[in-house]
Amino acid sequence: MALVDPASITRDGCWLWRGAGKGNGYGSFVLEGKTWPAHRAAYLIFNGSHPGELDVCHRCDNRACVNPDHLFLGTRQQNMDDCRRKGRTARGSRLGPRSGEDGTAAKLTWDQVRQIRASSAPSKQLAAQFNITNDNINRIRRNDTWKETQ
Ligand SMILES: [Zn+2]
């Protein structure tokens, strides 16, 4: 496949997407006028079926990988469970925001960050609930820290 450089196939058989990176480790690909994470586009291209609402997960835990043999479909919940099992959530929590910058790095998980973003409660209340500062809450809401990957 032309979009995968043979030189970027790893020892584990991962196919690293050349167009990788908007800084989050996932490749991107424009399909149907929409920017897709490369692994989702790869799933569609190789399997001929649309992942729809399902997440495309990596067996190999390599975000830039588009090897269809390494991709599988799961629900958002399964994907999160899978990530948790592989420890990606723990790694993400450490590396998620520019680490240590605002002190929320070690205190929050992605689940909590999503809860904060989904909540319409006043930031003061959330700050108390999650034991972080008001300012931390505002930065999370502004997407200054804990940037979503897609
Ligand atoms: Zn892989």
Image (cartoon, helix red, strand yellow):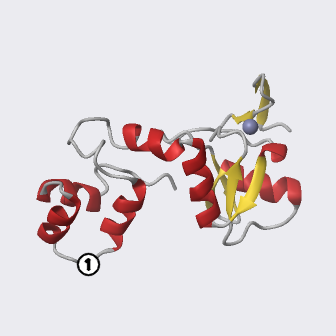
Disc 1 residue crowd, few under 14, some 14–19, many 20+, Cα 10 Å: few
Furthest-bottom residue in view?
Answer: 120
Q: Is residue 109 above or below residue 102?
A: below
- Point out residue 6 in the picture as x, y percentages from the top left corner: 82, 25
Residue in the picture at 35% in, 61% down: 112
From the viewer's perspective, is 148 left or right of 16?
left
Quadrant into which the N terminus falls: top right
Quadrant hosting residue 70: top right
Q: Nearer the viewer, residue 83 or 35?
A: 83
Residue at the image position 30 percent from the left and 75 percent from the top: 119
Cβ of mark 1 under 8 Å from ligand 1: the answer is no
Estimate the x, y position of residue 89 in percent, counting from the top left.
48, 47
Residue identified by numbered label 1? 120
Question: Residue 55 location in percent, x, y?
Answer: 66, 62
Closer-to-camera residue (99/132): 132
The residue tagged with tag 1: helix, strand or loop?
A: loop
Q: Is residue 141 left or right of residue 132?
A: right
Q: Which residue is pictured at 21% across the width and 77% down the height? A: 121
| Residue closest to the eye, 21 or 86 | 86
23 or 118, which lies in front?
A: 118
Q: What count of labels does the image hold?
A: 1
The three-letter amino acid code for the residue at tag 1 is: Ser
Left or right, 50 with respect to 48, comes to left
Locate ligand 1 by image quadrant: top right
Q: Which residue is at 78% across, 67% downward?
A: 50
Give the vertical position of 77 relative to 143 (above or below): below
Tell whether 11 sits left or right of 132.
right
Q: Position of residue 131 (x, y in %)?
A: 18, 57
What is the quadrant of residue 116 in the picture?
bottom left
